[in-house]
Amino acid sequence: GPAETSPSVVFENIQKCSLSCLRLLLENISGLTADDDFTVEVIPEINVAVATFIKSTDTEEFVKKCSQHRRVREFNMTARLLELTQKIRAESLPDTISTDYITVYFESARNGGGPVSDVQLFPEENSAIITFCSHKGNT
């Protein structure tokens, strides 16, 4: 149930949707208010955003709603729970980005991150795969 699920939802492929657009979209889908009920952090370098709900919300249900939403589909965005996302693939990275930067970025509490166990950087593809340590001992 909602008690065990993560309060954070990761949106990938957000390049077609600005922060203000995303905030409005999430308000529409959730019926909640940005800043009061949830926060949105954008990581422009990798076209990812993290929405963290302050107000207790069934994020699993929210992810389902997002995935079915016409605009989300039009933007080709994907939504999933941060906690269940043990690996995130980051694309369109700048050439100068380092694994240290990525690690620190994703471990930042402000970005709803958690302990990163591994970052694989693929410079030729300008992409990386970030692996998180599981918060709970679940496999």
Image (cartoon, helix red, strand yellow):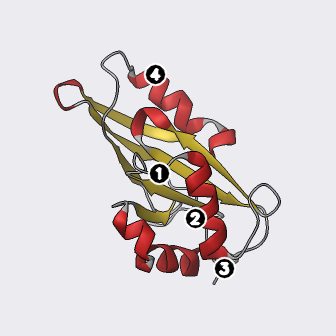
Q: Which mark is residue 25?
A: 2
Determine the image quadrant of residue 123.
Answer: top left
The mark that comes first in sequence, 3 or 2, is 3
Determine the image quadrant of residue 119.
Answer: top left
The mark that comes first in sequence, 4 or 2, is 2
Identify the image quadrant of the C terminus.
bottom left
Q: Residue under circle 4? A: 100
Note whether 93 is above or below 87 in the view shown: above
Q: What is the spatial separation of the Cα atoms under label 4 and label 2, in whole angstroms?
A: 32 Å
From the viewer's perspective, is 68 left or right of 111? left
Amino acid bearing label 1? Cys
Note whether 108 is above or below 22 in the view shown: above
Amino acid bearing label 3? Pro
* CB under 8 Å between discs 1 and 2: yes
Q: Residue under circle 3? A: 2
Q: Residue under circle 1? A: 17
* CB under 8 Å between discs 3 and 1: no
In the rendered image, is residue 113 in sight? no
Q: What is the spatial separation of the Cα atoms under label 3 and label 1, in whole angstroms?
A: 28 Å
Q: Residue at x 62, y 42 (%)?
A: 111
- Is disc 3 placed on a helix, strand or loop? loop
Question: Residue 103 location in percent, x, y?
Answer: 48, 31
- Is disc 4 placed on a helix, strand or loop? helix
Amino acid bearing label 2? Leu
Amino acid bearing label 4? Asp
